[in-house]
Amino acid sequence: MEQRQTISYLANRLKAAGLQPLNRYGQNFLIDLNLVDLVARSGQLGPDDVVLEIGTGTGSLTERLIRDAGRVVTVEIDAHLAALAGQEFADNPRVRLLQRDALKNKNTIHPEVIAAVRAAMSEIGPHAKFKLVANLPYNVATPILSNLLLCDPVPVRMVATIQKELADRIVAVPSTKDYSALSIWIQSVATVEILRVLPPSVFWPRPKVHSAILAIEPRQDLRTRIVDLHFFHTTVRAFYFHRRKFLRSVVISALKDRIGKERVDEVLAAEGMTPSTRAEELSVEKTISLVNRLREACNE
């Protein structure tokens, strides 16, 4: 199907339902069916997989996912779109559609979403695997990807269409403008790869920016380097609240109720850092080492 036919189909379908894309929900539909197929195939899906899709839209990706996956849990915040997509999957017991915000708050995936994933995994059995495959709404992509890495279960693979600017931040290296707490957090527990850069023309309505298909593969061997995942996550975020400040002052401010200045100086010295070191200069490995040592000092 040509793009213009897909645009026409979507526009007519929404118009018939009295709907139109809503900016506040970040609704930009992927209209190139070859790219929809690429997103689905990049999930490397099989019958033991439970796929979480956030941003059901009209269900075009959902339909493609269920061909290969054992179960699909798809989440749509827009009640009207959820009703529209629900018509397509009402008779398919392997698809569960939730009409709700996938986030409880900016730091937490909604418990109902995770409960639905766990229930679907129970239906498949002990070999079930959890994956995310989604054309993520731009306005929730960061908290979705970040918070899923703290969930139980953790996805074994995440493939998402997101803003290219965000993808660049996630794969960034130290001492670059895109390197951030998000870069460190995701790279500390997973391998990341940009699979394809997408122009605005493959979406309807067209966004003002380029997008990218990003693959994230969480790895247990990487996670085990971090003593306390939640402490690491919150501390690294605190490092980047004022990214241009010297690391010493940032650490003192972030941990002021738990560790004294002298102990901070001892930890930084032990890690080979000078008073002029900044957080953005530290590699992922060096950040992990520093935060592990800071946690130990906080618990002395």
Image: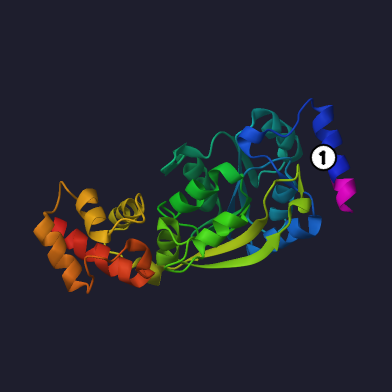
How are the residues colored?
Answer: rainbow
- Quadrant in the picture for residue 101: top right
Furthest residue toward bottom = 272
* Residue segment shown in magenta: 2-6
Q: Secondary structure at mark 1?
A: helix
Furthest residue toward top = 18
* Residue depicted at 34% across the width and 72% down the height: 285
Asked if 235 appears above or below 110 in the picture, the reply is below
Percent coordinates x, y for residue 105 in the rendering: 43, 37
Q: Main secondary structure of the magenta part?
A: helix
> Toward the viewer: 86 or 203?
203
Instruction: State left or right for residue 107 relative to residue 78.
Output: left
Instruction: State left or right for residue 184 relative to residue 9.
Output: left
Instruction: State left or right for residue 41 relative to residue 3.
Output: left
* Residue depicted at 40% across the width and 59% down the height: 185
Residue designated by label 1: 10
Instruction: State left or right for residue 295 relative to residue 45.
Output: left
How packed mark 1 is, by other alpha carbons closer than 10 Å (few <14, some 14-19, many 20 or more), is: some
- Residue 220 lies in the magenta-colored region: no
Q: Is residue 128 visible?
A: no
> Toward the viewer: 83 or 189?
189
Percent coordinates x, y for residue 140 in the rendering: 54, 43
- Quadrant in the picture for residue 138: top right
- Residue 5 lies in the magenta-colored region: yes
Quarter holding the C terminus is bottom left
Percent coordinates x, y for residue 61 in the rendering: 71, 50
* Residue depicted at 62% across the width and 36% down the height: 25
> Toward the viewer: 134 or 97?
134
Identify the amino acid type marked 1. Leu
